[in-house]
Image (tube, rainbow, N blue to C red):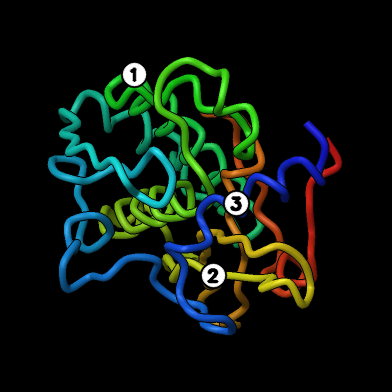
């Protein structure tokens, strides 16, 4: 699927997005707090079906969370290594959770969702779910060099089609990094790129 095709179908979730120029949480936490706030492996929510129209409550037993912890053992030596481990953990969690929520066959972008089996996700779903995963990693003490950030937006037709990503913030420097799982099929490691570069329109080459 080409970049232009991905961007064209991203329009489907625009009505669920905040006003132009605003970057922050994608959901109304007053009415939907379970979707993104204080998640734990024992109880969290996964969004799907574009704009978080479908929510699935998930419980992972200790044995299912153990491989996620193993990704961070031994602990990363620096922030760059930790970002690589974060990408590994997000891909792993998607592979674990996908069969439980009928999202295992989610395709990159939005276009292929019309023919792929199961429930598909747009960038709102993906950024919300990845933020949930990041907060679970942080709460479990697995992130030493980063903290989970808020979902971030770009575009609004001035610099391109609107699009959303999860993010992490590097401790000490305060530098933001986009963790964008929307660009790949379910279970692939998401790209982790500087947030400023992502906001300028970054897209993967493959």
Residue 78 left/right relative to 171: right
Callout 1: helix, strand or loop? helix
Q: Which residue is mark 1?
A: 99
Q: Residue at x 43, y 45 (%)?
A: 50
Measured Cα–Cα span from mark 1 to mark 3 = 21 Å
N-terminal of the pair, mark 1 or mark 3, is 1
Q: Which residue is mark 3?
A: 180
Earlier-in-chain disc, 3 versus 2: 2
Mark 2 residue crowding within 10 angstroms, few (<14) / some (14–19) / many (20+): many
Q: Mark 1 vs mark 2: which is more N-terminal?
A: 1
Secondary structure of residue under mark 3 = loop
Reply above or below: 126 against 49: below
In this orientation, does residue 166 appear? yes
Estimate the spatial distance between the alpha carbons at disc 3 and disc 2, rounded to whole Å.
10 Å
Q: Nearer the viewer, residue 172 or 200?
A: 200
**Image quadrant in which you'd find residue 99:** top left
Q: Residue at x 25, y 42 (%)?
A: 55
Residue at 60 percent of width and 62 percent of height: 79
Which residue sits at x=51%, y=65%?
168
Where residue 194 sits in the image (x, y, percent)?
Answer: 71, 67
Residue wearing tag 2: 152
How dense is the environment of label 1, judged by Cα within 10 Å: few (below 14), some, or many (20 and up)? Answer: few
Residue 42, position as x, y percentages in the image: 13, 40
Which quadrant is the C terminus positioned in?
top right
Does dot 2 land on a helix, a strand or a loop? strand
Which of these two is toward me, 146 or 144? 146
Coordinates of residue 181 in the picture (x, y in percent): 57, 44
Quarter of the image with the N terminus in it: top right
Please, is residue 92 above or below residue 28 in the view? above
Q: CA distance from mark 1 to mark 2?
A: 27 Å
């Amino acid at each position: 699927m080409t970049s232009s095709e991905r961007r064209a179908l991203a329009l489907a979730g625009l009505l669920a997005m905040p006003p132009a120029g605003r970057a922050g949480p994608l959901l109304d936490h007053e009415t939907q707090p379970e979707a993104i706030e204080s998640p734990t492996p024992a109880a969290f929510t996964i969004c799907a079906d574009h704009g978080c129209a479908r929510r699935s409550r998930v419980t992972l037993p200790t044995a299912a969370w153990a491989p996620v912890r193993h990704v961070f053992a031994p602990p990363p030596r620096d922030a760059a290594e930790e970002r690589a481990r974060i990408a590994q953990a997000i891909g792993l969690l998607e592979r674990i959770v996908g069969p439980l929520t009928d999202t295992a066959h989610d395709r990159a972008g939005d276009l292929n969702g019309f023919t792929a089996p199961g429930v598909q996700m747009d960038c709102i779903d993906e950024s919300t779910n990845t933020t949930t995963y990041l907060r679970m990693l942080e709460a479990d003490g697995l992130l030493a060099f980063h903290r989970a950030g808020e979902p971030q937006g770009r575009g609004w037709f001035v610099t391109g089609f609107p699009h959303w990503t999860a993010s992490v913030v590097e401790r000490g420097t305060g530098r933001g990094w986009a963790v964008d799982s929307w660009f790949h099929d379910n279970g692939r490691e998401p790209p982790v790129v500087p947030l400023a570069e992502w906001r300028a329109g970054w897209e993967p080459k493959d």
